[in-house]
Image: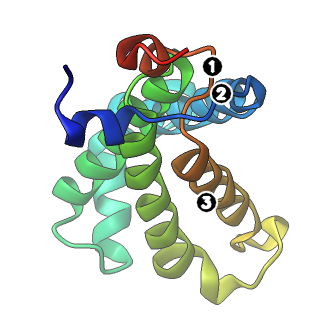
């Protein structure tokens, strides 16, 4: 018998639709986290991201860069694999709220001006997965044993 708290964290609906959201959104988050953590895909790594975070008031910048990068990278991987999707989605939702209000909100809505449009879409996707869970085709579903 699984502990009730663990069952709640892994709980998911029975649909397969979450897979269509989990995979692309998980890839996006993983790539953005890799930019922050490792400097991959044209990113600035922890040093550059930390300096940027310090400059906009998210201090200490190095720690904030590490936290943001880790949430995005590992949370994104969790979405792709379909494991611990609800906790990952909760952390990713919070990260996107911080991004919206600390980085993008003052620049307006549209992405071409640095606005919050894209971060809002990622926030909505993460909240959707927070509500639905990973879906039928997931490790979470297999771990709970629900059919």
Q: Where is residue 80 in the image (x, y as percent from the top left)?
A: 55, 21
Q: Which residue is drawn at 72% across and 28% down?
A: 15
Check disc 2 and report the residue beneath it: 14
Badge 3 vs badge 1, beta-carbon distance below 8 Å: no
Task: Answer left or right for 97 relative to 104.
Answer: left
Task: Answer left or right for 111 relative to 34.
Answer: right
**Badge 3 local density, few (<14 within 10 Å), some, or many (20+)?**
many
Dot 3: element: helix
Badge 2 vs badge 1, beta-carbon distance below 8 Å: yes
Task: Answer left or right for 130 relative to 73.
Answer: right
First in sequence: mark 2 vs mark 3:
2
First in sequence: mark 3 vs mark 1:
3
Q: Distance from label 2 to label 3 (Cα)? A: 23 Å
Check disc 1 and report the residue beneath it: 136
Q: Quarter of the image containing the C terminus? A: top right
Q: Residue 121 carries which label?
A: none
Q: Nearer the viewer, mark 2 or mark 3?
A: 2
Q: Position of residue 105 (x, y in %)?
A: 62, 83
Check disc 3 and report the residue beneath it: 123
Q: Where is residue 48 in the image (x, y as percent from the top left)?
A: 35, 49
Q: Position of residue 3 (x, y in %)?
A: 16, 32
Residue 90 vertical placement versus 12 (above, below): below
Q: Distance from label 3 to label 1 (Cα)? A: 22 Å
């Amino acid at each position: 018998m699984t502990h009730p708290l663990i069952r709640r964290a892994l709980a998911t609906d029975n649909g397969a639709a979450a897979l269509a959201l989990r995979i692309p959104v998980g890839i996006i988050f993983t790539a953005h986290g890799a930019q922050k953590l490792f400097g991959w895909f044209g990113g600035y790594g922890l040093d550059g991201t930390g300096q940027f975070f310090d400059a906009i008031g998210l201090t200490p910048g190095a720690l904030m860069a590490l936290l943001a990068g880790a949430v995005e990278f590992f949370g994104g991987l969790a979405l792709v694999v379909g494991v611990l999707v609800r906790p990952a989605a909760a952390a990713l939702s919070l990260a996107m709220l911080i991004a919206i209000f600390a980085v993008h909100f003052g620049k307006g809505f549209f992405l071409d001006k640095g606005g919050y449009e894209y971060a809002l879409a990622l926030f909505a996707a993460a909240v959707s997965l927070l509500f639905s869970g990973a879906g039928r085709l997931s490790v979470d579903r297999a771990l709970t044993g629900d059919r």
